[in-house]
């Protein structure tokens, strides 16, 4: 069993990668960028819960195999989304962290299954906030997971739905200090799905670290314009370097480093 130590004293943890695994070559290229940027965590979706049934749904099992191979090659910890209770056991064989997406925060059968499988195999869990869920409902969802063992849960704020249509969702940064007040759980920010536009990702990444988030979950892509999923919000190689530079600056004011 790998000891992930998601939260490391004095560090903010950046999990970066494409929205979806598209091919081995694509993931290899992006993982190399992640590694060469000094980061240790790779994100990539194999099962993609899309709003439209006509959109790319992910490479599914083949994607998991690619993610495992590339994660091992670059010695990166990996995370991918689990979308239903039936595939949790299978997914957990291929990744270090199981991600529960916004659409499934209230899928209690899935939460319980993830809790027991994560406990059995020593996996961590990222629980995204439902886009229409309160902080209280989010924290109760954590208890469905922890009722089945003591898997470490990392909360991820990814934007909630408000009346503002300019951004994809509205990033609730106040969730960070509130969660810190109400719990001891780590909390990371996903600026990508919150704003939905790559040029807004860097400022919100800076703000996330300034407000005390333990890390970021951020979408990056070597060729965003060709991405099969969420290319409009992915940072390209240059933007990724700029984001890391700026976020490091904010982190250093707080006496932290990025990893
Ligand atoms: C994702 O991280 O790729 C994703 C689908 O996010 P969310 O569940 O926040 O929409
Ligand atoms: Mn995405």
Image: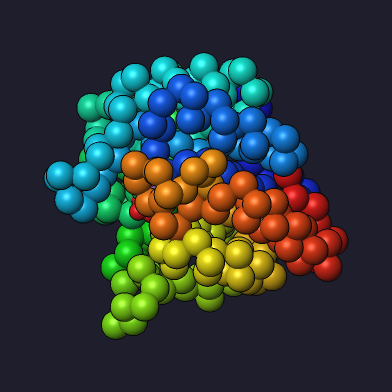
From what the image shows, is residue 191 above or below residue 78?
Answer: below
From what the image shows, is residue 167 above or below residue 83?
Answer: below
From what the image shows, is residue 6 above or below residue 24?
Answer: below
Across and down, in percent, residue 232 comes to 41, 57
Q: Quadrant of the N terminus?
A: top right
Q: Nearer the viewer, residue 73 or 3?
A: 73
Residue shown at 57% from the left, 69% from the top: 204
Residue shown at 64% from the left, 23% from the top: 74
Q: Quadrant of the C terminus?
A: top right
Q: Give the left or right position of residue 140, taking residue 184 as reference.
A: left
Across and down, in percent, residue 100 comes to 37, 44
User: Is residue 145 among the parts visible in the rendering?
Assistant: no
Across and down, in percent, residue 49 comes to 26, 44
Across and down, in percent, residue 55 comes to 21, 44
Residue shown at 76% from the left, 66% from the top: 250
Residue shown at 39% from the left, 38% from the top: 20
Count of numbered tags: 0
Q: Give the left or right position of residue 202, taking residue 210 as reference.
A: left
Residue 146's image quarter?
A: top left
Q: Give the left or right position of residue 183, taking residue 138 as reference.
A: right
Q: Nearer the viewer, residue 241 or 160?
A: 241
User: Is residue 230 among the parts visible in the rendering?
Assistant: yes
């Amino acid at each position: 069993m790998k000891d992930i130590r998601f939260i490391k004293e004095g560090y903010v943890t950046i999990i970066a990668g494409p929205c979806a695994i598209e091919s081995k070559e694509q993931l290899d290229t992006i993982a190399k960028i992640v590694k060469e940027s000094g980061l240790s965590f790779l994100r990539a979706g194999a099962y993609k819960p899309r709003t439209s049934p006509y959109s790319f749904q992910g490479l599914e099992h083949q994607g998991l195999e690619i993610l495992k191979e590339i994660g091992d090659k670059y010695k990166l910890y990996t995370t991918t989304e689990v979308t239903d209770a039936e595939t949790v056991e299978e997914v957990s064989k291929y990744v270090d962290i199981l991600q529960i997406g916004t659409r499934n925060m209230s899928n209690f059968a899935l939460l319980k299954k993830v809790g027991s499988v994560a406990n059995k195999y020593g996996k961590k869990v990222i629980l995204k906030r439902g886009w229409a869920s309160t902080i209280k409902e989010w924290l109760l969802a954590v208890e469905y997971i922890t009722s089945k063992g003591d898997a470490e849960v990392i909360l991820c704020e990814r934007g909630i739905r408000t009346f503002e249509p300019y951004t994809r969702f509205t990033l609730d940064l106040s969730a960070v200090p509130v969660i810190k007040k109400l719990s001891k759980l780590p909390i990371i920010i996903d600026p990508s799905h919150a704003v939905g536009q790559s040029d807004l990702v860097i400022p919100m990444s800076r703000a996330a670290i300034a407000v005390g988030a333990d890390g970021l979950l951020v979408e990056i892509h070597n060729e965003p314009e060709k991405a099969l999923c969420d290319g409009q919000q992915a940072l390209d190689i240059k933007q990724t370097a700029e984001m890391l530079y700026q976020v490091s600056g904010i982190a250093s004011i707080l006496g932290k480093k990025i990893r």
